[in-house]
Amino acid sequence: MPDPSLPSAKSVIHVDTRGAIILTEESPETRDSRGIYLPNHVEPVSHIAVDVGGSLAKVVYFTRSPDPPPSPQSVAATNGTTTPGDLSDIATPINVSPPRTPSPGLGTRDELSSSPSSSILRTNGALTPLALDPAHDPDHLDSLGALLRQRTVATQHFPGGSVNFMRFETSNIHACVEFIQALIAHSAVLNRVPLEQMRASVKIMATGGGAHKFYEVFRSELGVEVRKEDEMECLIEGLKFITMIPDEVYYFSDEVIRQGMAAQMAGPSPPGEMERPSPNPPQYAVTFASEPTPQLPCLLVNIGSGVSIIRVDEDGKFERVSGTSLGGGTLWGLLSLLTPATTFDEMLAFSQQGDNASVDMLVGDIYGQDYSRMGLKSTMIASSFGKVFKQGGVDKGKFRPEDISKSLLYAVSNNIGQIAYMNAEKYNLDRIYFGGCFIRGHAATIATLSYAIRFWSKGTKRAYFLRHEGFLGSIGAWIKNISEDSMQ
Amino acid sequence: MPDPSLPSAKSVIHVDTRGAIILTEESPETRDSRGIYLPNHVEPVSHIAVDVGGSLAKVVYFTRSPDPPPSPQSVAATNGTTTPGDLSDIATPINVSPPRTPSPGLGTRDELSSSPSSSILRTNGALTPLALDPAHDPDHLDSLGALLRQRTVATQHFPGGSVNFMRFETSNIHACVEFIQALIAHSAVLNRVPLEQMRASVKIMATGGGAHKFYEVFRSELGVEVRKEDEMECLIEGLKFITMIPDEVYYFSDEVIRQGMAAQMAGPSPPGEMERPSPNPPQYAVTFASEPTPQLPCLLVNIGSGVSIIRVDEDGKFERVSGTSLGGGTLWGLLSLLTPATTFDEMLAFSQQGDNASVDMLVGDIYGQDYSRMGLKSTMIASSFGKVFKQGGVDKGKFRPEDISKSLLYAVSNNIGQIAYMNAEKYNLDRIYFGGCFIRGHAATIATLSYAIRFWSKGTKRAYFLRHEGFLGSIGAWIKNISEDSMQ
């Protein structure tokens, strides 16, 4: 039952998500940064949301444009359930637009762009705060409808607009700051107003740990108002919003989980499974939630550098009930020292080629067979990395980076799945959403988390994944302030 | 309430543990292999128990000797609660006998001895199976008392005898086999019987995964009967027995936990704390359970290569309810690749000198302060190893092995503590015993596990530790068969 003492994400969402469409990506790196076109959202917003975590700073902002969005064929990343294809569909849409061609009008961006102004120039969209509308005069405002009729906008905008997503490294926060500066400057040009006037009508909504740490940096360098928002509240608001977008939420069917786990226990990923599209597609499909349904109550497991576990009641009241320090930062840190990989995607690619059985100690290695009395199959992992240590020293070159990567990916994912399950059981929740920048649409990770939940719950609970998984906090910070803007 | 479908460790323990004394150790390596002198146990036993795990094979056997045990002063490792001293008292007795001097009569052994016969020669004790007693004739046996009166033993034995403990690497199981061969041969000599007659009166009780895997090796190479015992049953029997030995069980007072955690959060262990005895001993003390009390119901967390979590009801019925693959094998494996250390103790020594804050991402690193709304202090670990990864590559030589060791020791220990707590909470158990070869009396590990349990349970649950932590399974295998021998 709702605990009145718990903080609650109370705001009503004022964004009309009818007809929302997730856009194509420019490149594989942006797989969770695809823009979302909202054809019915007509309230101009004037703020930029930034969620600064331990490793990554996530930015969300809304733009409008004179031009129509790309045609539906290339706009729709997927429609409902995928036809049998490979799991990289989650990352790469079926109809792939030519990479790196500017999408006219609506926003997709390269992740970790090193050249902010070139990113901006790739879009014709701009911030369009209501405050800049010459016809807008708060003293004459009597209703939202009257406001819209009174508007004569500096530029004619195509109906709706897009939510845009960008990512930067927290250790290089100034790249993020420069990007926002360029966005504001670019918007001033498009709106034909002086920069100072543009700044006066823009706010930064900052959340995540860095909202505190970098508050002064944002405020002084951008010259705009900065407001701090609570991280957990933003995560929950973001979850509630993003799960209303068709095809945002996805999960593995039991068939997919079985196939994925068979691959896990058999060693390296069998050829043809979990690869890019091929003439012989695998016999499973990812299920997308194309008709969003009520999501609460649920458990949210946000996997960033570390992991936060938050339970959310039916009415949106939430509580951080648990977490673990064995998160994305742990895995990437270990693999950066133990393998030649230097990026997340290199590490995940290594793991796909690996055979964890050369590094992990399996039940069969200890028992020579199943330990059936206790329900432990011989292929289950008894000790992660358990084959590595040898008294008197080990030949450090002996273990392949591929096998090391797979072992540690499983170790971290299985552990998160187990702790998530135990909390879901404790609080009697059947839906477990995974957010955060860790998963990256990686098939083996999703399969491992899905399997852990299905296994421990004996099939009564389910893991759900989000295409904009890393942006829950920034989306929530953006959403929380819409109501305020629309009343200006 | 007891579940009749659960396996139960039913046997009644026939070993008289009154006056049991834990003996001195020969060297720091044998800190959990100290013999136990049982002055009132007069039933000769004829079997050797072996628990073969993923990494280590643990051996338990009982010997008698014509000579008395060493004087009480050097025999008693500790008496009740330690006076303020350092935590290494758990490893090193207050009254340290000169290292490596043979203790006349009763058994202590070097761990991982490479020369089995020299180990045997250091003791005058021997197996003394009842079957070899010339006066023993099963047809004349009417009661145990009569049996004892009728005995004229080949050698006069000092009352009671000792339980002895030895350890070998599973990957070198033949060293274990050779040791047992030498023990049997030596006992034949002392008992003045032919080797074949000795063999006919000795049994091997084998448990652990390797009981299945190495059954044939033991049987054929030793020429004795080998019986397989269920691993979980042996763990529980071993736990029930060993907790009856005075001063076997110990735990940290809340004061010790606070000190230990203050040291953890402050960086490297402050000088003077957690070090060997010094003129200014720390102001805390470890509490030993000198008056053993009922231990059931409880949760047993056995940390070997991997971790098994077993709940035990009041009546001894047990069930393996959980586990984790992130165990001792994981930590030693990771540290063997990430540091120059080649033994467990080197790795633990590294960790004592480390400052995990240079490797771990703390809450304060992300927030710049506490995240008090969620109860997260700035010194808490948000992401283990979270400072290591940098996009574009990392200077692998930059991180000290000491800091790496401390970080990963905390990561593994905290995780086990958390999962253990969640299971204790689920099954409403307040006592959590930690067994297995992982802990090794290491102060920081014990503090971390103790703190995790106290923290998560808000002080309602407690972690208990065992001085013979790695030998639960082998002790259980030994105990389970005593009743049979005593009726021969």
Image (spheres, coloured by chain):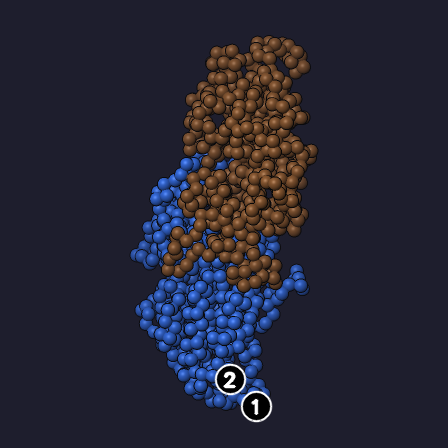
Chain colours: A blue, B brown
- Look at 47% across and 89% down and name the residue there: A152
Mark 2 or mark 1, which is nearer the start of the sequence? 2
The residues tagged by marks 1 and 2 sit, at their Cα atoms, a distance apart of: 13 Å
- List x then y, in percent, for residue B324: 51, 44
Image quadrant where residue B69 sits? top right
In front: mark 1 or mark 2?
A: 2
- The crowd level at tag 2 (other Cα within 10 Å; few <14, some 14-19, many 20+) is many
Secondary structure of residue under mark 1 = helix
Badge 2 amino acid: Ala
Question: For the residue marked with disc 1, what is the amino acid?
Answer: His
Secondary structure at badge 2 equals helix
| A26, above or below B246, in the image | below
Please name the residue that numbered disc 1 is placed on: A140
Decide which of B4, A38 is in the foreground and name it.
Answer: A38
Q: Which mark is residue B473?
A: none
Q: Is residue B249 visible?
A: yes
For label 1, the crowd category at 10 Å Cα-Cα, with few meaning under 14, some 14 to 19 and many 20 or more, is few
Give the residue pinned by disc 2.
Answer: A131
Marked residue chain, label 2 = A
